[in-house]
Image (cartoon, rainbow, N blue to C red):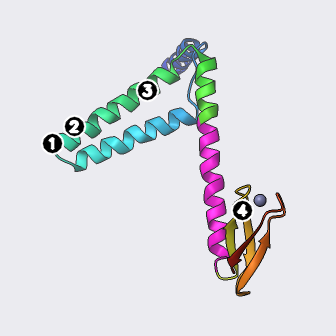
């Protein structure tokens, strides 16, 4: 049995050697397929059918990418996905910081350069000078 497993492992490794393999995007598309499959089992008729087809589509997409021989294109897709994911994480962190400081600070967007500015709360109406572009505008702190 152990021999059979080692044999299978070696053959699989040989089969996969010029194929792309699993990456973060593949993990995402497979997870999405799983979620769609679960949703389809909790819904009925047309809705269930739509989610079942979505699950199959995402499984097919995952298989296509994992076994693809065009590693360069797959790598580019994964890098693009990682960039988008990083943007979301950064936005989430900023939102959390703003939420934590909501009682002590107010946040403004500079009308000149769209930079986010932080002003201590409770000083009434104030003139704000953007440190980046020098634009002056007023706001209630
Ligand atoms: Zn500015």
- Residue 98, quarter of picture: bottom right
Viewer-proximal residue, 131 or 55? 131
User: Majority secondary structure of the magenta segment?
Assistant: helix
CA separation in Å, label 4 and label 2: 48 Å
- Image coordinates for residue 94, horizontal then vertical, percent: 66, 62
Quarter of image, ligand 1? bottom right
CA separation in Å, label 2 and label 1: 6 Å
Horizontally, residue 45 falls left or right of residue 108, namely: left
Please report the residue visible at 83 percent of the width from the left and 58 percent of the height from the top. 132
Q: Which residue is mark 2?
A: 49
- Residue 104, quarter of picture: bottom right
- Classify mark 2: residues with Cα within 10 Å, few (<14), some (14-19) or many (20+): some
User: CB of mark 3 within 8 Å of CB of mark 2?
Assistant: no
- Residue 50, quarter of picture: top left
Please report the residue visible at 64 percent of the width from the left and 40 percent of the height from the top. 83
Q: Which residue is mark 3?
A: 61
User: CB of mark 2 within 8 Å of CB of mark 1?
Assistant: yes
Q: Earlier in the sequence, mark 3 or mark 2?
A: 2
The CB of the residue at mark 1 lies under 8 Å from ligand 1: no
Q: Which residue is mark 1?
A: 45
- For the residues carrying marks 4 and 1, which lies nearer the camera in this image? 4
Viewer-proximal residue, 12 or 44? 44
Q: Earlier in the sequence, mark 3 or mark 4?
A: 3
Q: Which residue is mark 4?
A: 110
Q: Secondary structure at mark 3?
A: helix
Q: Which residues are magenta?
A: 81-102
- Classify mark 3: residues with Cα within 10 Å, few (<14), some (14-19) or many (20+): some
Disc sitting over residue 121 in the figure = none
Q: Earlier in the sequence, mark 3 or mark 1?
A: 1
């Amino acid at each position: 049995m152990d021999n059979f497993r080692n044999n299978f492992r070696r053959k699989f490794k040989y089969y996969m050697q010029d194929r792309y393999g699993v990456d973060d995007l593949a993990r995402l598309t497979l997870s999405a397929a799983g979620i769609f499959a679960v949703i389809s089992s909790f819904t009925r008729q047309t809705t269930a059918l739509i989610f079942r087809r979505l699950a199959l589509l995402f499984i097919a997409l995952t298989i296509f990418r994992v076994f693809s021989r065009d590693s360069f294109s797959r790598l580019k897709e994964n890098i693009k996905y990682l960039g988008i994911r990083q943007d979301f994480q950064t936005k989430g962190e900023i939102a959390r910081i703003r939420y934590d400081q909501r009682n002590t600070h107010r946040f403004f967007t500079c009308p000149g350069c769209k930079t986010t500015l932080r002003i201590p709360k409770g000083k009434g109406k104030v003139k704000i000078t953007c440190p980046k572009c020098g634009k002056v505008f007023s706001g209630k702190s």
